[in-house]
Amino acid sequence: MTQLAPELLQRLRTCTNLPSPPAIAMRVVQLAQDPEIDIDKVAHAVSADPAIAAKVMRMANSAMYSMRRPSTNLHQALMLLGLNATLTLALSFTLVHTLRRNQTTGFDFTAYWRRAILAASWAKLLAANAGLRQAEEAFLAALLQDIGMLAVEKVWPEVYQGIAPFQLPHGDVAEHERSRLGADHCGIGAALLQQWNMPQLLVRAIQHSHQPAATDVAEDERTLVTCVALSSELSEVWLQRDNEAALRSIGGKVQQYLGIGQARLAELFATIGDQLPVAESVFDMRLFDAAQTAAILETANTILAERSMQALAEVHDLRLRQRSLEVENVELKQESCRDPLTGAYNRRHFEDALEREFQLAVRRDLALSVVFVDLDRFKEINDGYGHAAGDVVLVEVAKLLRQCVRDRDIVARYGGDEFVLLLPGCELAQAESVGSRVVAAARRRTIYLDDGRMLDVTLSLGIATADAQRRFRSPKALLAAADEALYQSKRDGRDRFTCYMAEDRQARA
């Protein structure tokens, strides 16, 4: 955590008129950090304060937890809310009660709590919509994010003299505090909670409550910090409801940082409008009248709906451009991994695929077959008919090979008149069937040259299969085995396939 200047920190520590959490709050903090926590310990701690117990019951039966059965006793309420939510709510109730009791003279305490409770409601709602489990922690952090302002008013009352901090943009207030103290209420509030031995997650959320894009926060805490920081800005937009530019700006930020779109944000504004009376009831504080809330919601809905339509149009255009680029990228990728003459995959692509499929076969104990294919007497075709005829033959052989294998199999030109087939998940018997099919198809195929002449070709194949009975130490070893089997086919008279067998090799040796 960024440290305050030593003199500020010392003044904060020695000030005796600062509010401090009561014993029940500190007990709640201890429970929250106890790995052996259970429902009975929480029930005992909460029941020690009837006022807190009543508020927990009220929260459990409030609209915030609608669609669930009513709780008729404290134990049911605790089970409904869950341990984490109960601890967070109990702590927030105790701190609110203490801070209200210790409110300062001349400080607009009602404006302070209006902003705090509105921010807490926003933070919890944002966290829930962002899929964050720590929605209750976000609620408490947002509720207390401006607690440093109370400390400033107590310890350095001259800072707020001559200004109305709750009638200014919140960022301007923080800048004013830094100009006078060298620190703002975020850092001071974090130091105060550190002094109270509050959980570190809560301390960091308050420290960064003006930084939705804080970079020095752990990855698993970033979403919570973002929700708290955005809750501050959403509260300000709500409280300064005529600021249409700010409303458009916060809509973009919520989408950028949390992925919540404009239309969904408009729905969340309506949800906040429904939940505010609940929060007012729970915290015994009047925040807004119905007409004021309705005006805010109407403005927000209009602006966000307009922004949402604009965003949809922008997204549509962006998707069209993205699809065009994706098509171009696919075409370029295909060109880079294809043999330009035959359209088969090239050697580099085949070797990458062989490495990948070999590792997968080893991990999952799957079969993998490789088939080397060679054109018989191809040199004679080039010498007797010309290289153009040889190119026609290569193209036709590539077509034949693709017709004899599955869509998932890979047909590649390995070099010259050599092709290679990669058959993932193919057992030896299946590979033999492929070999037989290829040899027979070549015998039946007549190739027509551009000048009308006809050619008949035959193919020689070598097959190697890696499976439970035949292990290979590497992809190269598997490929070499297929190559060896190919040359055995050549030695045996061509126009056939041969399967690599380690025992045959030993016998020949």
Image (cartoon, helix red, strand yellow):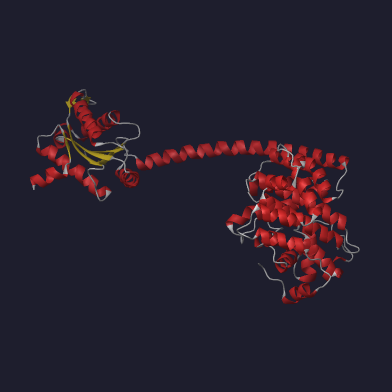
Q: Nearer the viewer, residue 37 or 142?
A: 37
User: Residue furthest toward the right?
Assistant: 106
Which residue sits at x=16%, y=45%? 502
| Image quadrant in which the N terminus is located | bottom right
| Residue 267 quadrant | top right
Q: Nearer the viewer, residue 413 or 77?
A: 77
> Looking at the image, is 181 positioned above or below residue 325?
below
- Left/right placement of residue 159 relative to residue 133 reads right
Percent coordinates x, y for residue 483 in the rendering: 19, 43
Percent coordinates x, y for residue 45 in the rendering: 73, 57
Q: Nearer the viewer, residue 298 or 322?
A: 298
Q: How many marks?
A: 0
Q: Is residue 228 visible?
A: no
Q: Nearer the viewer, residue 387 or 255?
A: 255
> Looking at the image, is 444 positioned above or below residue 86?
above
Q: Is residue 436 visible?
A: yes
- Left/right placement of residue 257 relative to residue 173 reads left
Which residue sits at x=80%, y=44%? 278
Which residue sits at x=67%, y=45%? 128
Percent coordinates x, y for residue 167 in the rendering: 86, 56
- Left/right placement of residue 390 relative to residue 364 reads left
Percent coordinates x, y for residue 488 in the rendering: 13, 40
- Left/right placement of residue 221 relative to residue 307 reads left
| Residue 459 quadrant | top left
